[in-house]
Amino acid sequence: MSTVTTVGVTGMTCANCVSHVTTAVESVDGVENVSIELRVGEASEVTVFSDDPLDEAALRGAIAEAGYEVATIEVQQDALATQYREQSAEKQAAHDLSIHTEG
């Protein structure tokens, strides 16, 4: 199973902040990959990929230890299957549209 955890983190203002949070989050057991979209002046989006759901307290603790605050956490389990279903539906809709426009 694949899990994507999206964390809104406040207080990040630069690439150094991104580096600190990345290192902190990577130290949490089960984390496979971390991606951060820096948003100065609002909550930055930290996307964490893992095989199984992560320990939310450990994730919050790691971010707090790095000196930042968690604003939101959203967990999507079985993320790859969900993404595949969404893409399949989009492809089918595009296919159906092309059939209707050809005739």
Image (cartoon, grey):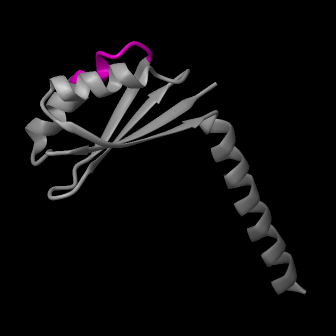
1 shown above or below 103:
above
Q: Is residue 5 left or right of residue 100?
A: left
- Quarter of the picture containing the N terminus is top right
Point 9% across, 36% down: residue: 16
30 shown above or below 48:
above
10 or 40, which lies in front? 10
Q: Quadrant of residue 70?
A: top left
Point 55% across, 21% down: residue: 52
76 shown above or below 27:
below
Number of marks in picture: 0
- Quarter of the picture containing the C terminus is bottom right
Point 54% across, 30% down: residue: 3
Whether residue 8 appears in magenta in the rendering, the answer is no
8 shown above or below 90:
above
Q: Picture coordinates of residue 96 (x, y %)? A: 83, 72
2 or 58, which lies in front? 58
Q: Picture coordinates of residue 61 (x, y %)? A: 26, 22
Name of the residue lying farthest toward the right: 103
Q: Quadrant of residue 78?
A: top right
Q: Is residue 45 left or right of residue 30?
A: left
Whether residue 27 appears in magenta in the rendering, the answer is yes
37 or 77, which lies in front? 77
Q: Picture coordinates of residue 42 (x, y %)? A: 21, 57
The magenta region covers 24-30
Point 15% across, 56% down: residue: 40
